[in-house]
Amino acid sequence: MVGIEKAGIPAVLLVMKRFDVDSRRNAKTVGLDAIRLICVDESAVPLPGLLEKSDMPSRIAAGIINGLTTNPQKVQIDADHDKEFLTYHGTAEGKASTFMEKDFLNRCWSDGLPLVPPTSDAVLRMTAAVDRDPNESIGAVMPGGTQATIRKIAVNAVMAGCLPQYMPVLVAAVEAITDPRFDLLGVQCTAGMVSPLLIVSGGALIDDLNINDSFSSLGPGWRANSTIGRALRLIMINIGLAWPGNPDMKAIGSPFKTVHLLAENDGCYEEFWEPFRVAEGFGYDQPTVSVYPAVGWQPEVMPPDRATTEELVTLLGAQARVKYDKKANFWGMDNLVILSPNAYNAIRREGYSRRDFQKMLYHVAQVPCREFFAGQEPRQDCGGVPIPDSIVSTCQDDPDGLAPLLSAPDNIKIIVTGAPGPYMFAYVSTWGFGNAYCVHKPIQLPGQWRNILAENDGWQTPIIR
């Protein structure tokens, strides 16, 4: 429709009523300031046999005729998003903050938790923690397409309760989600249960920021873990203009929507495996943040008497097959494996490198060709990455033959986190209806890094390793 309209040919978009605002926002994002839209009041298309008895076809026909013979409607976007300052008055600071909270909630500028007022002074302290111009844009946050400037990122960081030293991580995270390989538009607007999972790699930075990489590393209790992830979600809401139902259409949602920050436990590698950041092409001393489009996970425990690499690969392969979405066609995309230190030690004891383990899992994560192609004729255009002729030919010759669920061992991303204990692991699946890559960005620390840490000291939560 976009191409037709821009070519000067009138077109009409037909959507269900619940997609009204979503469609208008997306049209604005791709350059259509006006749009011809027909909204069908029903929540779903009537069942076969009932459609013919309803008046839906005649109403749609009338809407198409009206849409093609009248001027398109102007798309309206909330102008208050562009205001630099908002003022709230009260008999005390707490009262003014309450008015702000209520207003932000009514405007859908909140995640539902109490917000820290983003005063000018607080935002200034946040922007001073990065060596960047406050007006510099990091990227356009979809679906709204609003530019995420350093100042706007700082506003949301303050609201989330971040400390200034968290800003370099948050800026890198915004660079990652706005990278086209992450497909933020799809992640934000899909009805599927996908959401970003943040991964920080870099032992020294993790210590500096008091990010938990040990017991309950995906749990509560650490300000950095909690507020950096929260700030990214607020950025996705407030800069990306994505609110549940407008236009975030996830029917149920996901616990990952309260964005989680996961820290790699560098210390457990004992120099046998390279850290995640090094495996992805960065230097050892370069901290990174990665964003992964996570859909779901099911942690499992490997029995101590069967704690071997072979058993671990077998169990992970079973998880991969269960989580394979025959309709999503995510072949060629990334998937994530999370290992506890003890699960990793089972691999280390037997001398398998990270690359060895990736290859083993790649060969185990296969399904019969008839399942791989979801009962359809084998073809190359099954997903975002073309399926090689060799796999298509194999499946044409033998429907019971096996096809790999991933295009290469490198598509299996592995992170070790947590503390000693059970042999725990999880295969975290992705969505695949758009780009589903794990995107990595370097974290750039400012020149006054040690001074910034010293000025904001005292917020550490004990980490038991």
Image (cartoon, rainbow, N blue to C red):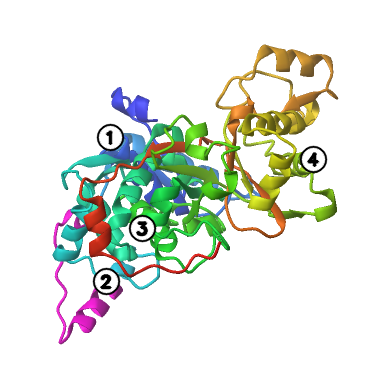
Instruction: Indicate the secondary structure of the residue bearing disc 4.
Output: helix
**Lower sequence index among marks 1 and 2:** 1
Q: Which residue is mark 3?
A: 231
Secondary element at image label 2 = helix
* Comparing labels 4 and 2, the label whose residue is closer to the camera: 4
Q: Circle 1 sits in a helix, a strand or a loop, which is it?
A: loop
| Cβ atoms at labels 3 and 2 below 8 Å apart | no
Mark closest to the chain's N terminus, 3 or 2: 2
- Which amino acid type is shown beneath numbered disc 3? Ala
Instruction: Give the image location of residue 339, x and y in percent.
Output: 64, 48
Which marked residue is nearer to the observer: mark 1 or mark 4? 4
The residue shown at (36%, 42%) is 26
From this viewpoint, is residue 84 visible?
Answer: yes
What residue is shown at x 59% (from left), y 31% (from top)? 411
- Per the image, the residue denoted by label 4 is 314
Say the numbered circle drawn on residue 169. none
In the image: residue 397, left or right of residue 164:
right
Residue located at (21% from left, 45% from top): 447
Asked which quadrant contains residue 367, the reply is: top right
Query: Does the residue at mark 4 contact the one at mark 2 (Cβ under 8 Å)?
Result: no
The kind of residue on which mark 1 rests is Gly
